Image (spheres, helix red, strand yellow):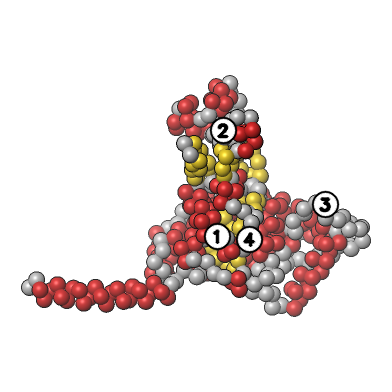
Protein backbone atom coordinates (compact mmCIF):
# COMPACT_ATOMS: atom_id res chain seq x y z
CA UNK A 1 0.00 0.00 0.00
CA UNK A 2 1.55 3.31 -1.05
CA UNK A 3 1.88 6.39 1.20
CA UNK A 4 -0.72 8.33 -0.76
CA UNK A 5 -3.43 5.74 -0.21
CA UNK A 6 -2.45 5.41 3.44
CA UNK A 7 -2.71 9.15 4.02
CA UNK A 8 -6.12 9.22 2.34
CA UNK A 9 -7.35 6.68 4.84
CA UNK A 10 -6.13 8.65 7.86
CA UNK A 11 -7.03 12.21 6.86
CA UNK A 12 -10.43 13.53 7.91
CA UNK A 13 -12.33 16.53 6.66
CA UNK A 14 -13.46 17.51 10.18
CA UNK A 15 -12.42 16.71 13.77
CA UNK A 16 -13.74 13.43 15.20
CA UNK A 17 -16.07 14.16 18.11
CA UNK A 18 -17.02 10.64 19.25
CA UNK A 19 -16.19 6.96 18.91
CA UNK A 20 -19.43 6.35 17.02
CA UNK A 21 -18.58 9.09 14.52
CA UNK A 22 -15.09 7.65 14.00
CA UNK A 23 -16.53 4.20 13.21
CA UNK A 24 -19.11 5.65 10.83
CA UNK A 25 -16.49 7.71 9.01
CA UNK A 26 -13.89 4.98 8.58
CA UNK A 27 -16.39 2.24 7.76
CA UNK A 28 -17.91 4.36 5.03
CA UNK A 29 -14.71 4.98 3.12
CA UNK A 30 -13.99 3.21 -0.11
CA UNK A 31 -11.31 0.54 -0.07
CA UNK A 32 -8.74 0.57 -2.82
CA UNK A 33 -5.98 -2.00 -2.48
CA UNK A 34 -3.92 -3.75 -5.08
CA UNK A 35 -5.03 -7.35 -5.48
CA UNK A 36 -1.46 -8.32 -6.45
CA UNK A 37 0.88 -9.78 -3.90
CA UNK A 38 -0.25 -13.38 -3.79
CA UNK A 39 -2.54 -15.42 -1.61
CA UNK A 40 -1.14 -15.86 1.89
CA UNK A 41 -3.03 -19.12 2.33
CA UNK A 42 -5.06 -20.25 5.32
CA UNK A 43 -2.26 -20.86 7.83
CA UNK A 44 -3.13 -17.78 9.88
CA UNK A 45 -6.45 -16.81 11.41
CA UNK A 46 -6.79 -13.15 10.49
CA UNK A 47 -10.17 -11.67 11.41
CA UNK A 48 -11.71 -9.20 9.00
CA UNK A 49 -11.23 -5.62 10.32
CA UNK A 50 -14.18 -4.30 12.31
CA UNK A 51 -13.85 -0.93 10.59
CA UNK A 52 -13.98 -2.68 7.22
CA UNK A 53 -17.54 -3.89 7.76
CA UNK A 54 -20.04 -2.22 5.42
CA UNK A 55 -23.34 -0.88 6.76
CA UNK A 56 -25.13 -2.58 9.68
CA UNK A 57 -24.48 0.42 11.93
CA UNK A 58 -26.87 -0.72 14.67
CA UNK A 59 -25.03 -4.02 14.99
CA UNK A 60 -21.68 -2.25 15.18
CA UNK A 61 -23.00 0.23 17.73
CA UNK A 62 -24.38 -2.57 19.93
CA UNK A 63 -21.04 -4.41 19.87
CA UNK A 64 -19.13 -1.22 20.73
CA UNK A 65 -21.47 -0.49 23.64
CA UNK A 66 -20.91 -4.01 24.98
CA UNK A 67 -17.14 -3.43 24.91
CA UNK A 68 -17.52 -0.18 26.83
CA UNK A 69 -19.98 -1.43 29.47
CA UNK A 70 -20.20 -5.08 30.49
CA UNK A 71 -23.23 -4.32 32.69
CA UNK A 72 -25.40 -3.98 29.57
CA UNK A 73 -25.91 -7.73 29.64
CA UNK A 74 -24.47 -8.71 26.29
CA UNK A 75 -25.77 -8.66 22.74
CA UNK A 76 -27.97 -11.01 20.73
CA UNK A 77 -27.66 -10.81 16.95
CA UNK A 78 -30.70 -12.17 15.13
CA UNK A 79 -30.81 -12.55 11.39
CA UNK A 80 -30.65 -14.83 8.36
CA UNK A 81 -27.53 -16.43 6.98
CA UNK A 82 -24.94 -14.22 5.32
CA UNK A 83 -25.72 -10.95 7.13
CA UNK A 84 -22.29 -10.72 8.76
CA UNK A 85 -23.11 -11.75 12.34
CA UNK A 86 -20.17 -14.08 12.93
CA UNK A 87 -17.75 -11.97 10.91
CA UNK A 88 -18.65 -8.87 12.92
CA UNK A 89 -18.11 -10.56 16.29
CA UNK A 90 -14.78 -12.08 15.28
CA UNK A 91 -13.65 -8.72 13.94
CA UNK A 92 -13.80 -7.27 17.47
CA UNK A 93 -10.42 -8.83 18.19
CA UNK A 94 -8.54 -5.88 16.69
CA UNK A 95 -10.27 -3.21 18.83
CA UNK A 96 -10.57 -4.84 22.25
CA UNK A 97 -9.42 -2.79 25.27
CA UNK A 98 -6.91 -3.70 27.98
CA UNK A 99 -7.84 -5.39 31.27
CA UNK A 100 -6.02 -6.35 34.45
CA UNK A 101 -5.77 -10.13 34.84
CA UNK A 102 -4.75 -12.38 37.68
CA UNK A 103 -1.54 -14.38 37.26
CA UNK A 104 -3.07 -17.18 39.36
CA UNK A 105 -4.83 -20.31 38.10
CA UNK A 106 -7.56 -19.66 40.67
CA UNK A 107 -7.88 -15.95 39.85
CA UNK A 108 -6.51 -14.49 43.10
CA UNK A 109 -6.38 -10.68 43.15
CA UNK A 110 -4.75 -8.07 45.41
CA UNK A 111 -8.18 -6.82 46.49
CA UNK A 112 -8.93 -10.30 47.84
CA UNK A 113 -6.12 -9.81 50.33
CA UNK A 114 -7.19 -6.23 51.06
CA UNK A 115 -10.75 -7.28 51.88
CA UNK A 116 -10.34 -10.79 53.28
CA UNK A 117 -6.79 -11.00 54.53
CA UNK A 118 -3.94 -13.22 53.39
CA UNK A 119 -6.05 -16.37 53.86
CA UNK A 120 -8.40 -15.15 51.10
CA UNK A 121 -5.89 -16.17 48.40
CA UNK A 122 -4.16 -19.43 47.57
CA UNK A 123 -0.83 -20.29 49.26
CA UNK A 124 1.22 -19.47 46.14
CA UNK A 125 -0.36 -16.02 45.84
CA UNK A 126 0.01 -15.42 49.59
CA UNK A 127 3.73 -16.07 49.23
CA UNK A 128 4.04 -13.85 46.18
CA UNK A 129 2.07 -11.09 47.88
CA UNK A 130 4.33 -11.29 50.91
CA UNK A 131 7.39 -11.03 48.65
CA UNK A 132 5.97 -7.93 47.00
CA UNK A 133 5.53 -9.62 43.62
CA UNK A 134 2.55 -8.61 41.45
CA UNK A 135 -0.52 -10.81 41.35
CA UNK A 136 -1.83 -9.25 38.14
CA UNK A 137 -0.71 -8.24 34.65
CA UNK A 138 -2.13 -6.12 31.84
CA UNK A 139 -3.61 -7.98 28.88
CA UNK A 140 -6.03 -7.41 26.02
CA UNK A 141 -9.61 -8.67 26.04
CA UNK A 142 -9.80 -11.89 24.02
CA UNK A 143 -12.61 -13.49 22.07
CA UNK A 144 -13.55 -16.92 23.41
CA UNK A 145 -15.82 -18.97 21.18
CA UNK A 146 -18.04 -21.78 22.43
CA UNK A 147 -17.94 -24.74 20.01
CA UNK A 148 -21.39 -25.93 19.03
CA UNK A 149 -20.50 -29.53 20.00
CA UNK A 150 -19.41 -28.58 23.53
CA UNK A 151 -20.51 -30.63 26.52
CA UNK A 152 -21.66 -29.20 29.84
CA UNK A 153 -18.34 -30.26 31.40
CA UNK A 154 -16.51 -28.26 28.73
CA UNK A 155 -18.53 -25.21 29.72
CA UNK A 156 -18.24 -25.32 33.52
CA UNK A 157 -15.16 -27.51 33.97
CA UNK A 158 -14.47 -30.89 35.55
CA UNK A 159 -11.74 -33.13 36.90
CA UNK A 160 -8.27 -32.50 35.47
CA UNK A 161 -7.36 -35.85 33.91
CA UNK A 162 -3.69 -34.90 33.58
CA UNK A 163 -3.52 -34.23 37.31
CA UNK A 164 -5.16 -37.59 38.02
CA UNK A 165 -2.36 -39.35 36.16
CA UNK A 166 0.04 -38.00 38.78
CA UNK A 167 -2.37 -39.02 41.56
CA UNK A 168 -3.41 -35.44 42.17
CA UNK A 169 -6.95 -34.19 42.21
CA UNK A 170 -7.66 -30.80 40.69
CA UNK A 171 -10.63 -29.27 38.94
CA UNK A 172 -9.86 -27.82 35.54
CA UNK A 173 -11.31 -24.58 34.27
CA UNK A 174 -14.21 -24.63 31.88
CA UNK A 175 -14.93 -22.24 29.04
CA UNK A 176 -16.80 -19.90 31.40
CA UNK A 177 -13.70 -19.43 33.54
CA UNK A 178 -11.53 -19.00 30.46
CA UNK A 179 -13.92 -16.26 29.32
CA UNK A 180 -13.40 -14.21 32.50
CA UNK A 181 -12.75 -10.56 31.52
CA UNK A 182 -13.11 -11.59 27.89
CA UNK A 183 -15.86 -11.82 25.28
CA UNK A 184 -17.75 -15.11 25.14
CA UNK A 185 -19.24 -15.67 21.70
CA UNK A 186 -21.97 -18.30 21.34
CA UNK A 187 -22.75 -18.77 17.67
CA UNK A 188 -26.14 -20.36 16.91
CA UNK A 189 -27.12 -19.98 20.56
CA UNK A 190 -30.63 -21.22 19.77
CA UNK A 191 -29.20 -24.65 18.93
CA UNK A 192 -27.50 -25.18 22.30
CA UNK A 193 -28.99 -27.50 24.90
CA UNK A 194 -30.98 -25.76 27.62
CA UNK A 195 -28.69 -26.80 30.48
CA UNK A 196 -25.66 -25.29 28.74
CA UNK A 197 -27.46 -22.04 27.97
CA UNK A 198 -28.66 -21.83 31.58
CA UNK A 199 -25.12 -22.35 32.88
CA UNK A 200 -23.73 -19.67 30.58
CA UNK A 201 -26.39 -17.11 31.45
CA UNK A 202 -26.14 -17.80 35.18
CA UNK A 203 -22.36 -17.44 35.05
CA UNK A 204 -22.68 -14.18 33.14
CA UNK A 205 -25.26 -12.69 35.50
CA UNK A 206 -23.54 -13.73 38.74
CA UNK A 207 -19.96 -13.03 37.65
CA UNK A 208 -18.80 -16.31 39.20
CA UNK A 209 -19.84 -19.95 39.48
CA UNK A 210 -18.97 -23.02 41.52
CA UNK A 211 -18.04 -26.46 40.19
CA UNK A 212 -18.63 -29.45 42.45
CA UNK A 213 -17.32 -32.90 41.72
CA UNK A 214 -17.97 -35.22 44.64
CA UNK A 215 -16.43 -33.77 47.82
CA UNK A 216 -14.35 -31.28 45.85
CA UNK A 217 -15.42 -27.86 44.65
CA UNK A 218 -13.91 -24.74 43.14
CA UNK A 219 -15.31 -21.28 42.46
CA UNK A 220 -14.26 -19.37 39.35
CA UNK A 221 -14.88 -15.84 38.18
CA UNK A 222 -16.94 -15.48 35.00
CA UNK A 223 -17.10 -11.75 34.31
CA UNK A 224 -17.49 -11.65 30.56
CA UNK A 225 -19.42 -9.88 27.83
CA UNK A 226 -21.80 -12.36 26.25
CA UNK A 227 -22.54 -12.17 22.55
CA UNK A 228 -24.88 -14.63 20.90
CA UNK A 229 -26.08 -15.05 17.35
CA UNK A 230 -28.96 -16.98 15.87
CA UNK A 231 -30.86 -17.61 12.68
CA UNK A 232 -34.60 -17.59 13.52
CA UNK A 233 -35.21 -20.06 10.67
CA UNK A 234 -33.52 -22.72 12.82
CA UNK A 235 -35.64 -22.21 15.93
CA UNK A 236 -36.31 -19.62 18.62
CA UNK A 237 -35.04 -19.08 22.14
CA UNK A 238 -37.02 -19.72 25.31
CA UNK A 239 -38.44 -16.43 26.67
CA UNK A 240 -36.41 -16.85 29.86
CA UNK A 241 -33.19 -17.04 27.85
CA UNK A 242 -34.16 -14.19 25.54
CA UNK A 243 -34.77 -11.95 28.54
CA UNK A 244 -31.21 -12.46 29.76
CA UNK A 245 -29.66 -10.85 26.67
CA UNK A 246 -29.31 -7.08 26.98
CA UNK A 247 -29.23 -5.59 23.49
CA UNK A 248 -31.08 -7.26 20.63
CA UNK A 249 -30.17 -6.49 17.04
CA UNK A 250 -32.33 -7.73 14.18
CA UNK A 251 -30.28 -7.84 11.00
CA UNK A 252 -31.54 -7.71 7.47
CA UNK A 253 -29.63 -8.00 4.23
CA UNK A 254 -28.16 -4.81 2.83
CA UNK A 255 -30.66 -3.13 0.49
CA UNK A 256 -28.34 -0.60 -1.12
CA UNK A 257 -26.85 -2.13 -4.31
CA UNK A 258 -23.71 0.00 -3.95
CA UNK A 259 -23.14 -1.29 -0.42
CA UNK A 260 -23.59 -4.89 -1.56
CA UNK A 261 -21.06 -4.31 -4.33
CA UNK A 262 -18.65 -2.76 -1.85
CA UNK A 263 -19.01 -5.82 0.38
CA UNK A 264 -18.05 -8.04 -2.55
CA UNK A 265 -14.99 -5.93 -3.36
CA UNK A 266 -13.79 -5.95 0.24
CA UNK A 267 -14.30 -9.69 0.67
CA UNK A 268 -12.49 -10.36 -2.60
CA UNK A 269 -9.55 -8.18 -1.57
CA UNK A 270 -9.45 -9.72 1.88
CA UNK A 271 -9.37 -13.26 0.52
CA UNK A 272 -6.62 -12.28 -1.93
CA UNK A 273 -4.44 -10.47 0.59
CA UNK A 274 -5.80 -10.19 4.15
CA UNK A 275 -2.62 -8.57 5.48
CA UNK A 276 -3.04 -5.56 3.21
CA UNK A 277 -6.71 -5.11 4.13
CA UNK A 278 -5.91 -5.34 7.84
CA UNK A 279 -3.00 -2.92 7.47
CA UNK A 280 -5.27 -0.44 5.69
CA UNK A 281 -7.42 -0.12 8.82
CA UNK A 282 -4.68 -0.69 11.41
CA UNK A 283 -4.09 2.90 12.52
CA UNK A 284 -7.79 3.72 12.77
CA UNK A 285 -8.36 0.45 14.62
CA UNK A 286 -5.77 1.53 17.18
CA UNK A 287 -7.60 4.84 17.55
CA UNK A 288 -10.92 3.07 18.10
CA UNK A 289 -9.28 0.79 20.67
CA UNK A 290 -7.95 3.86 22.49
CA UNK A 291 -11.38 5.51 22.43
CA UNK A 292 -13.01 2.38 23.84
CA UNK A 293 -10.45 2.26 26.64
CA UNK A 294 -11.05 5.93 27.39
CA UNK A 295 -14.81 5.40 27.46
CA UNK A 296 -14.45 2.44 29.84
CA UNK A 297 -12.40 4.55 32.22
CA UNK A 298 -14.90 7.40 32.05
CA UNK A 299 -17.95 5.14 32.51
CA UNK A 300 -17.95 4.95 36.35
CA UNK A 301 -18.41 8.74 36.51
CA UNK A 302 -21.30 8.88 34.02
CA UNK A 303 -24.68 9.64 35.61
CA UNK A 304 -28.31 9.52 34.48
CA UNK A 305 -30.38 12.51 35.63
CA UNK A 306 -33.71 11.62 37.22
CA UNK A 307 -35.66 13.40 34.49
CA UNK A 308 -33.98 11.24 31.84
CA UNK A 309 -34.51 8.04 33.84
CA UNK A 310 -38.21 8.84 34.34
CA UNK A 311 -38.69 9.13 30.58
CA UNK A 312 -37.13 5.71 30.12
CA UNK A 313 -39.29 4.12 32.82
CA UNK A 314 -42.42 5.74 31.38
CA UNK A 315 -41.58 4.32 27.95
CA UNK A 316 -41.02 0.83 29.35
CA UNK A 317 -44.31 0.91 31.25
CA UNK A 318 -46.13 2.27 28.20
CA UNK A 319 -44.89 -0.73 26.22
CA UNK A 320 -46.08 -3.10 28.94
CA UNK A 321 -42.66 -4.67 29.50
CA UNK A 322 -42.60 -6.47 32.87
CA UNK A 323 -38.91 -7.40 33.17
CA UNK A 324 -36.78 -5.09 35.31
CA UNK A 325 -33.83 -6.03 33.10
CA UNK A 326 -35.30 -3.58 30.60
CA UNK A 327 -34.36 -0.62 32.77
CA UNK A 328 -30.92 -2.04 33.52
CA UNK A 329 -30.08 -2.55 29.87
CA UNK A 330 -31.58 0.75 28.75
CA UNK A 331 -29.84 2.90 31.35
CA UNK A 332 -26.49 1.10 31.18
CA UNK A 333 -26.55 1.41 27.37
CA UNK A 334 -27.32 5.12 27.61
CA UNK A 335 -24.43 5.58 30.05
CA UNK A 336 -22.08 3.76 27.67
CA UNK A 337 -23.32 5.87 24.75
CA UNK A 338 -22.57 9.06 26.69
CA UNK A 339 -19.13 7.75 27.67
CA UNK A 340 -18.38 7.04 24.01
CA UNK A 341 -19.11 10.71 23.41
CA UNK A 342 -16.79 11.72 26.30
CA UNK A 343 -19.67 13.04 28.45
CA UNK A 344 -20.46 12.42 32.13
CA UNK A 345 -24.18 13.24 31.94
CA UNK A 346 -26.59 11.22 29.82
CA UNK A 347 -29.27 12.99 27.81
CA UNK A 348 -32.57 12.10 26.22
CA UNK A 349 -30.74 11.81 22.90
CA UNK A 350 -28.54 9.08 24.39
CA UNK A 351 -31.63 7.27 25.60
CA UNK A 352 -33.33 7.60 22.22
CA UNK A 353 -30.28 6.22 20.42
CA UNK A 354 -30.28 2.94 22.35
CA UNK A 355 -34.01 2.37 22.97
CA UNK A 356 -34.66 0.13 19.93
CA UNK A 357 -31.78 -2.22 20.77
CA UNK A 358 -32.60 -2.32 24.48
CA UNK A 359 -36.38 -2.76 24.36
CA UNK A 360 -37.26 -4.73 21.24
CA UNK A 361 -38.48 -8.31 21.58
CA UNK A 362 -39.28 -7.86 25.28
CA UNK A 363 -43.07 -7.89 25.16
CA UNK A 364 -44.98 -11.16 25.48
CA UNK A 365 -48.43 -11.70 24.02
CA UNK A 366 -48.86 -14.78 26.22
CA UNK A 367 -48.06 -12.83 29.41
CA UNK A 368 -50.41 -10.02 28.36
CA UNK A 369 -53.25 -12.49 27.87
CA UNK A 370 -52.40 -14.33 31.09
CA UNK A 371 -52.36 -11.14 33.18
CA UNK A 372 -55.60 -9.95 31.57
CA UNK A 373 -57.31 -13.24 32.48
CA UNK A 374 -55.81 -13.03 35.96
CA UNK A 375 -57.16 -9.50 36.45
CA UNK A 376 -60.63 -10.77 35.53
CA UNK A 377 -60.35 -13.62 38.01
CA UNK A 378 -59.09 -11.31 40.76
CA UNK A 379 -62.02 -8.95 40.14
CA UNK A 380 -64.56 -11.81 40.38
CA UNK A 381 -62.83 -13.10 43.52
CA UNK A 382 -62.94 -9.69 45.16
CA UNK A 383 -66.65 -9.31 44.32
CA UNK A 384 -67.42 -12.61 46.06
CA UNK A 385 -65.31 -11.59 49.07
CA UNK A 386 -67.21 -8.32 49.32
CA UNK A 387 -70.57 -10.17 49.20
CA UNK A 388 -69.70 -12.79 51.81
CA UNK A 389 -67.85 -10.52 54.26
CA UNK A 390 -70.31 -7.64 54.37
Locate the N terminus by quadrant.
bottom right
Q: Is residue 6 above or below residue 368?
A: above
Q: Which residue is mark 3?
A: 43
Q: Which residue of the protein is positioned furthest toward the top in this rendering? A: 131
Query: Is disc 4 in contact with disc 1, using a CB cutoff of under 8 Å?
Result: no
Q: Earlier in the sequence, mark 2 or mark 3?
A: 3
Whole-Å distance between the Cαs marked 2 and 1?
29 Å
The residue sitting at 50% across, 70% down in the picture is 361
Whole-Å distance between the Cαs marked 2 and 4?
33 Å
Q: Earlier in the sequence, mark 1 or mark 3?
A: 3
The residue sitting at 75% across, 74% down in the picture is 260
Q: Is residue 63 visible?
A: no
Tell me the element at label 2. Answer: loop
Q: Earlier in the sequence, mark 2 or mark 4?
A: 2
Tell me the element at label 3. Answer: loop
The residue sitting at 55% across, 60% down in the picture is 193
Whole-Å distance between the Cαs marked 1 and 3?
32 Å
Q: Which mark is residue 187?
A: 4
Q: Which residue is mark 1?
A: 193
Q: Is residue 227 visible?
A: yes
Which numbered disc, 2 or 4, marks the residue closer to the eye? Answer: 2
Percent of width and height locating residue 207 = 50, 47
Q: Residues within 10 Å of mark 4 (few under 14, many from 20)?
A: many
**Residue 285 placement, left or right of 386:** right
**Residue 238 placement, left or right of 21:** left
Q: Which residue is mark 2?
A: 169
Query: Is disc 2 in contact with disc 3, using a CB cutoff of under 8 Å?
Result: no
Q: Residues within 10 Å of mark 1 (few under 14, many from 20)?
A: few
Query: Is disc 1 in contact with disc 3, using a CB cutoff of under 8 Å?
Result: no
**Residue 71 placement, left or right of 250:** left
Q: Earlier in the sequence, mark 2 or mark 1?
A: 2
Whole-Å distance between the Cαs marked 4 and 1?
13 Å
Amino acid sequence: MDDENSSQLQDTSHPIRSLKELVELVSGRGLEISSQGGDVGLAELLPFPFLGLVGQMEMKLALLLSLVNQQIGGVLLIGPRGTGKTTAVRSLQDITPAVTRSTCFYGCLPEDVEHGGIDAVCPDCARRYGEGKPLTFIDRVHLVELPLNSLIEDVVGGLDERALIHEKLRLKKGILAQADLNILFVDEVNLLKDDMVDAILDGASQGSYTVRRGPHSATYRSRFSLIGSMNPEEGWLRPQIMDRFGLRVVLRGLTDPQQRLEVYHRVHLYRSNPHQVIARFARDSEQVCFEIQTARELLPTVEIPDQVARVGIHLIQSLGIPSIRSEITLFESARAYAAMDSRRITTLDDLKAVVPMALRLRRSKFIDEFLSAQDKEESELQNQIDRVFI
